[in-house]
Amino acid sequence: MDATQLAHFKMLLLREKQRILNHSKLSRNGELHVSSDDLADEADLASSEIQQHLIFQMRDRERQMLHQIDSALSRIDAGTYGICQETEEQIELERLKLMPWTQVSAAGAEIREGKKKRFVG
């Protein structure tokens, strides 16, 4: 991968990281914090708990995505960006365009999925 492509992917990763951080700040400011004492009945309490659960799931996904982006940025700095961690082959450019944080090629993803199935099954 040449320097122009690396700079392009670095810009995409930094832009995505900033988008997540901005979204996270905005949504935190807009979140409703309700005390269970303020809720009128069990239905309100259940609704509040569901909303809180969804917020926690969203935060966890954001945290995981930020970790993947930071890892990809580290690989750019280390000169290993675009190399599949399963097959050690080049990751397809189309795959990197869709998911610039990916660590594996399409073939590598199949290998990982096969390992998971064997481990779980």
Image (tube, rainbow, N blue to C red):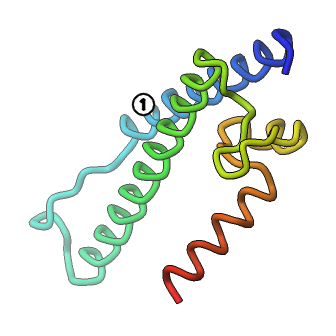
* Residue 2 rendering spot, x and y as whole percentages: 86, 14
Quadrant of the image occupied by residue 107 = bottom right
* Residue 95 rendering spot, x and y as whole percentages: 83, 45
Drawn side of residue 85 relative to residue 93, left or right = left
* Residue 3 rendering spot, x and y as whole percentages: 81, 10
In what quadrant of the picture does the N terminus appear?
top right
Q: Is residue 37 above or below residue 99?
A: below
Drawn side of residue 37 relative to residue 43, left or right = left
Drawn side of residue 62 relative to residue 107, left or right = left
Drawn side of residue 113 relative to residue 24, left or right = right
* Residue 69 rendering spot, x and y as whole percentages: 57, 33
* Along the viewing direction, whichever of 34 and 87 lies nearer the viewer: 87
Q: Is residue 13 above or below residue 60?
A: above
Toward the right, the furthest residue is: 94
Callout 1: SS: helix
Q: State the residue at coordinates (50%, 36%).
A: 66
* Along the viewing direction, whichever of 62 and 68 lies nearer the viewer: 68
Toward the front, the furthest residue is: 88
Q: State the residue at coordinates (42%, 59%).
A: 57
- Residue under label 1: 25
Toward the bottom, the furthest residue is: 121
* Along the viewing direction, whichever of 29 and 5 lies nearer the viewer: 5
Quadrant of the image occupied by residue 100 = top right
Q: State the residue at coordinates (62%, 21%).
A: 14
* Along the viewing direction, whichever of 4 and 35 lies nearer the viewer: 4
Which amino acid type is marked by label 1?
Lys
